[in-house]
Amino acid sequence: MEPARGRVFQRTRLHWMVLITFLCVMLTWAVFWPQQVPYEALGPIGAFSKHMVEHHSPLLYYGWWFAWSIHVAEAVYSLKLCRDKGINSLFSRFLWCLQTFLFGIASLSLLLKYRPDPRPKCR
């Protein structure tokens, strides 16, 4: 019998979720719709983004693909870690995989730290 779902799955901390979501949205926006980004309203981040779009557009494009490739690889690895750590619940595995795909290392680091109960389970 597996522990309660709340003990197996841990949600990534909110500040990481907000930061990573913002960065992914900004990168996607700058790569695919650079003319629509309100650079002036974003302060230093906007100035940096505008510079990158104007002078290093291919780097942003390939960086976007690289970042999402890393997120996919981390999500697949999270499934292996779930199996290795004895997380048998399909729902828990799904949550870990989805969260790791969306938030990358912020989620994967929680799963890496997770230590299952070493005691044998009673049947």
Image (spheres, rainbow, N blue to C red):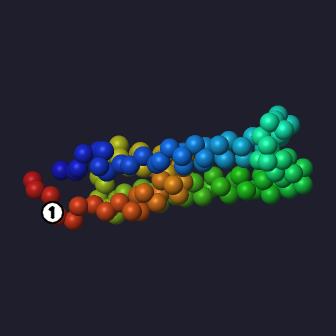
Residue 116: x %, y % from top left: 28, 61
Q: Residue furthest left?
A: 123
Residue drawn where x is 47% and y is 48% of the image: 13
Residue 11: x %, y % from top left: 42, 46
Q: Nearer the viewer, residue 101 or 6?
A: 6
Q: Residue furthest front?
A: 43
The 10 Å Cα crowd at callout 1, few under 14, some 14 to 19, many 20 or more, is: few
Residue drawn where x is 31% and y is 62% of the image: 115
Residue drawn where x is 62% and y is 56% of the image: 69
Q: Quadrant of residue 37?
A: top right
Residue 2: x %, y % from top left: 22, 50
In this view of the protein, can residue 75 be seen by the observer?
no
Residue 57: x %, y % from top left: 84, 52
In this view of the protein, can residue 65 be seen by the observer?
yes
Residue drawn where x is 31% and y is 54% of the image: 87
Q: Which residue is mark 1?
A: 120
Q: Nearer the viewer, residue 85 or 26?
A: 26
* Helix, strand or loop under label 1: loop
Q: Amino acid at mark 1?
A: Pro
